[in-house]
Amino acid sequence: MIVTRALLLAWTDLLRPRVLSIVLTGIALTIGLFVALQLGIFWAIRALFSGSIHLPLLGDVVIGPLLSWGSLMLFPVMGFFLMAPVAAAFSGLFAGQVADEVEALHYPQRRGEDPDFWEGLLEALPVMGAVLLVGLVSLMLTPFLGPFAPALFYGANGWLLGREFFQMAARRHLDEDAASALRRARPLSVTLLGVMIAFALTVPIANIAVPVLAAAGFTHLFHLLSGSVDRAA
């Protein structure tokens, strides 16, 4: 199956030195982003809740420190719901570098050109917002949807991430219209790989390397779908 092959090739690429350096950079930036976000929440709570409440047996308790330290428990929850939008945002930062390395290794006769960096980043921002919205809606609807909430979360995020990453990989070789036409011609493959990436983004610890995995996987998927026959060993 083309999607499985693209994903397996991407996994092996993560261990190659030149790609691994990008992985480590992505991990450092992702951890830094989440730590900064958590610190922001921590100190914002302390500033907003400066009063105290009287509790039986405990007396007066200052609620700011209590709530701020309790907010640390939100870190895993943030990781679950925010890794997908982080991946969408970082696609604009890493996709070109990853695609360069993947094509140099596997498709040396079909190396593409990066679209404008700022243009790619601006295109990623609406997708990041949409992915974040899907996560929030899924969270709010979980009590009503029950077991169907994960289907909404992974399905919608898979479609959005698939669209973003495939479009960025395809635009290295095609103009906007041709890239969109190829994506629409193979929507199942693009969305299925997107769903796999969305699922991987919810796996703790491993998910911080997934944005680079996604960029590599969709680069392979583009070449496999566009009929590349020059892949090097």
Image (cartoon, rainbow, N blue to C red):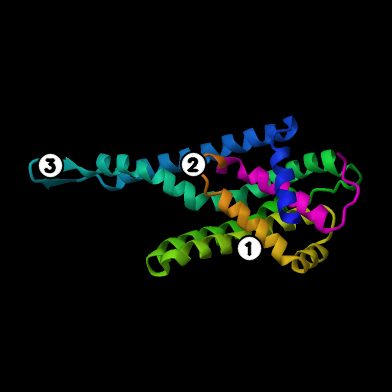
Is 114 one of the magenta-colored residues?
A: no
Reading the image, the residue beneath label 2 is 34
Residue 123 shows in the view: no
Q: Nearer the viewer, residue 213 or 31?
A: 213
Amino acid at circle 1: Trp
Q: Are marks 2 and 1 in contact (CB under 8 Å)?
A: no
Reading the image, the residue beneath label 1 is 159
Residue at point 74%, 44% (across, down): 9
Q: Quadrant of the N terminus?
A: bottom right
- State the extent of the magenta-drawn residues as a range: 207-233
- Name the spot of residue 119 as percent of width and height, x first: 72, 54
Residue at point 52%, 39% (across, down): 205
**Helix, strand or loop for disc 1:** helix
- Name the spot of residue 189 as percent of width and height, x first: 72, 61
Q: CA distance from mark 3 to mark 2?
A: 33 Å
Classify mark 1: residues with Cα within 10 Å, few (<14), some (14-19) or many (20+).
many
- Name the spot of residue 20 as percent of width and height, x first: 69, 33
Classify mark 3: residues with Cα within 10 Å, few (<14), some (14-19) or many (20+).
few
Q: Is residue 30 positioned above or below 225 on the image?
A: above
Residue at point 85%, 54% (across, down): 173
The majority secondary structure of the magenta stretch comes to helix
Q: Nearer the viewer, residue 154 or 136?
A: 154
Residue at point 77%, 49% (across, down): 220
Q: Is residue 178 positioned above or below 68 on the image?
A: below
Q: Which numbered disc covers residue 60?
A: 3
